[in-house]
Image: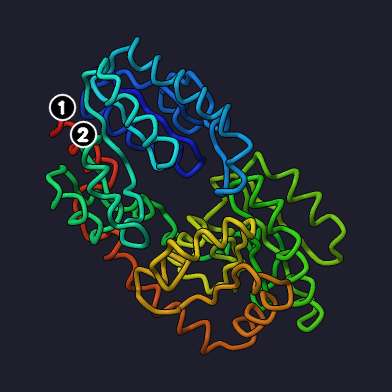
Amino acid sequence: MKLFFIAGENSGDALAAPLIKALKEQYCDDVECLGVGGPLMKAEGFDELLPLDQISVMGIWEVIPKIPRLLKLNKSIVEEIEKRKPDAVITVDFPDFNFILAKSLKKRGIYKGKLIHYVAPSVWAWRPGRAKKIAGFMDGMMCLFPMEVDYFTKHGMKAAHVGHPLVMSNSREFSGKEFRRENNIGENAKTIGLFFGSREAEFKNLSGAIKEAALLVNDIEPGIHIIAPTLSKLEYNVQKLLEDFKLPIYVVANPNMKWDAIKACDVAISVSGTMALELAYAEIPHVIAYKVNPITSIILRFLVKVKYAHLANILLDKAVVPECLQGKCTSENIAKEALELLQNEEKRQEQKEAFSALGKLLGEDSVAKPPERAAEFISSIL
């Protein structure tokens, strides 16, 4: 069996890698996985024809100057799929690029295999009418959240809640004590985690405000320790950003140390997105910060139908985590919210108690793991 994957972001790489492993286990290695992906997918035997950073772009306005190149790449991938004739194309998240590609494959009619998407677009948040359109060119949808399935099945599309990969993490096994001990951070020392995201554009847009917020917090609560888990590709950027700090800093790029470093944080400041959901699942009190190009923001203001940006707030349907967005995304506002958490045990406990309900919503109660459920769903369609 041959499967062509397209993952356009690091989060997609992290999703697809365990799915590839589950598929190989299910089919006793009698499955060929190739396409556009990242290092985690390659580690599972994926044949990377194009690295994912060639198609990854952040924000509506930021995409515009790169449209010609992206469309050319899209067309090249379509032609590669038609030439390779896989049994199925598995598009992973990254809907703007992947749906253009899927519609093109459908319209040209040369490719006869199945089209399956992993990670449902947030039709519950904005433009719910997209579900019907997607059902017209995709054969299957693998959803991370339970409330998403009905949006697609009511239009005759096969869809299933496979669960969120976070429930597979070993975050609950760590307390942060070992990280503190290895780095000589006292048991009563106050720590703040700084999380800059996985994209270079996010880092460029938000790192300054997050850094300044940490300095402001330290002005009022001197002696804090800064813990900054990041990806290896951004490790140098984070080191350079924080090199002038006159306080203890621990930049962690080793994925094996990730969860213990996270659990060592008393509070955290994070960009919005997957990282923030990971913090919530790990029950780390935090505040999120995010801003995009002003034109992108105006467009989103008219399209988005949910009250919150943080996925935990959306899933729990209440403002558990403070959100410093757009005009409110200033170092002063971020510091104010982080300080309130750092100085107020009751506030921290309120967040932790609310986060405890996330496990069930993310599929923690299922016997089969998310990649196994996703592999079974793919098998049911082929």
Disc 2 residue type (three-letter): Ile
Q: x, y (%) of residue 3? A: 30, 23
Residue kind at label 1, given as amino acid type: Leu
Question: Where is residue 12 shown, x and y percent of the image?
Answer: 44, 40
Above or below residue 222? Residue 94 is above
Residue at left offset 46%, top offset 37%:
13
Q: Which mark is residue 382?
A: 1
Residue position for label 2: 378
Secondary element type, mark 2: helix
Q: Residue at x 56, y 64 (%)?
A: 176
Residue 166 picture quarter:
bottom left
* Label 2 Cα crowd, 10 Å radius (few <14 / some 14-19 / many 20+): many
Quadrant of image for the C terminus: top left
Q: Is residue 151 above or below residue 254?
A: below
* 141 lies above or below 26: below
Quarter of the image where the N terminus is located: top left
256 or 60: nearer the viewer: 60
- Tell me if label 1 and label 2 are in contact, CB under 8 Å: yes
Picture layout, residue 375 above or below residue 313: above
Residue at x 53%, y 74% (from the top left corner)? 285
Q: Is residue 104 left or right of residue 338?
A: left
- Total marks in image: 2
